[in-house]
Amino acid sequence: MSEDGENTGPHEDLTAAFAALDIDRDRDRFLRELIGELSETLENVVGLSEAAGFIAVVGARIGAMMDRDYRDALGVERMEVEQVAAALVDLKQRLDSGFSIESIDDSKIVLRNTRCPFGELVKGRTSLCMMTSNVFGKIAAENLGYARLEIPESIAQGDQTCRVIVHLVPKDKRDPEPAREYFAVSDG
Amino acid sequence: MPDVNFLTPSSRVDFDALLEALDSPHVIVSGSGELVVANKACAHLFSDNPGFVEGYDIVPLLNGDESLLRELLRTALGVSTPLPLRLDLPGANTPTHFQAVAKRIAFHDARAGVLIRLRRIREGTSVFAELNQQIGVLHRRLGAEAHERRMLADVNRDLERFAAVAAHDLRAPLGQLMTMLEVFEMEGTDKLSTLQREVLQMMATASSRMSALVDALLDHSRMADAEVAKEPINLADTVREAAENLIEPIIETDATIQPGPLPTVACDPTLVRQIFQNVLSNSLKYRRDSVPPTIRVFANTIAGAVVVRISDNGRGFGGADTADLFRPFSRLANGLDQEGSGIGLATCMSIAARHGWKISAAENDDAGATIIIRIPAHQIITAETGEAPDEE
């Protein structure tokens, strides 16, 4: 330690030298990496179908928190379909993704995304899309009674953009296409 | 009583039958935890609890954080994805643990409940912990076996070192003894009695045998420790070189050696020549009376690997366990009339192992024996083998 009390020992020099290294990792990247790795590990260790259950629980909790934030901020008991679409786009933009509304009608909200908040880390990790699906589904269902999420295109699967369809009417029971459905629990 | 009559009387009959057909405990609850219906396997779990009644909240009957359980039930009610749950039932002494899956189920009147399927797990464990424990047991057993193998390998290495040191230290006094015997003979044995001359001859023969044994032991220990310098070698050339080193006994016995097309492999030429030399030497030694030895060396390919066979028309092994042949100092009962150290095949085994090859022996159906060397595919440079078809 020097006379003025500053640390100038070899450890401090090394620390300063390492801090100056050209490594692109900050808190944001670390957290994205952490979630990506957790998600991939969950998929690989317990399998995608079981991982879906865990992710649904996490997504439902986060979705409920975000839903409450928007309703409180807007001062409404329930959001209308346009408000729901705007909330979904807004929450994603706050997370640095490129969501926009492609179309809205009574039966569905269609969203387009050009930039994933997980960046390159999302590629091959479809369980991260499952998280988006659960958050969107929870918010849409709690406000509009029902939601069914479909992600026909995704950056995670190698597409250029993501296309997210939030169906607002229950599917035809004869439709064999598997889909993740969400229901308003407060009515249940 | 809360209204949980989710089922019409007729559909209730069908639903009960469906649930009863399931062996494992199943229960349907409302999103706030009231019991709708349970099968007998589930009801049996709560048989001591008077609170397990249709329409009543079952969450307080379970161990754990009530608010968390209710939140999970509500989450399950709000999504079509089945959710994993962990449930504990209190018992008189210890709780019973379950892994469960909760799935939203919709009824005819658009109301919905949560179907929970329970699977009992061992106290204080999960399936993961149980599997982990089993893996731990296996791991410990494998560790113990590996430890024993290491101990055995250490003992074998010590024995080999001892044999090498003993052989090395015996060589000098043995050499002196043989020199002195030669001096004795050079000086003349005329003044000795017949008995003395015979004893002297026996001493010379015995010391000569001992010298051969010491040399074989030294060769064996050198081979075990030798550095394996691999280069591309055609095995047919190696067989010819080994035969050249045995030219005297080959002429003496009128033997025929027939090397077929053999592959080129990555190996140490000196060490591998020693294998062929030892095996050919055995074939020459353990020949049948009045039958000139014929030794065929040929190879064929099996699943990419090459199998080289050295087959003779000699005495065979006389029914001995062929695995024993490769142990040091192993001598066959039908070969005791022949001089030998009993180390030759052990040396072959040691060299083969250093190359990652496998060596074994088999009696021929008609006469004689075959030594079989298996060389892995990745060591084959040119698989030039005979036309013998794949077998095994």
Image (cartoon, coloured by chain):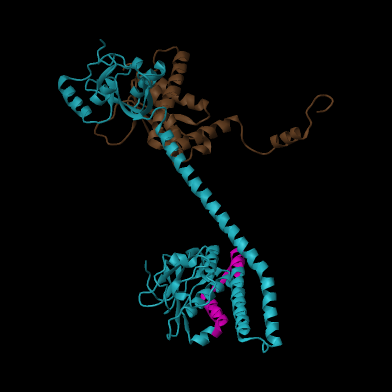
Chain colours: A brown, B cyan
The picture quadrant where one finds residue B305 is bottom left
- Give the percent coordinates (x, y) of residue B387: 40, 76
Q: Looking at the image, which is closer to me, A67 or B384? A: B384
- Give the percent coordinates (x, y) of residue B206: 59, 76
Residue that sits furthest to the right in the current view: A3
Asked if residue B311 is positioned above or below residue B155 in the image, the reply reads below
The picture quadrant where one finds residue B118 is top left
- Give the percent coordinates (x, y) of residue B291: 42, 85
Task: Name the residue at 62% across, 74% down.
Answer: B211
Residue that sits furthest to the top in the current view: B1
Magenta span: predominant SS is helix
Q: Looking at the image, which is closer to me, A145 or B100? A: B100
Give, as a single range, the part of the protein colored magenta: B219-248
Instruction: Decide if residue A159 is in sight here.
Output: no
Q: Looking at the image, which is closer to me, A31 or B246? A: B246
Q: Is residue B55 left or right of residue A83?
A: left
Q: Looking at the image, which is closer to me, B104 or B55? A: B55
Quadrant (top left, top right, bottom left, bottom right) of the N terminus of chain B: top left
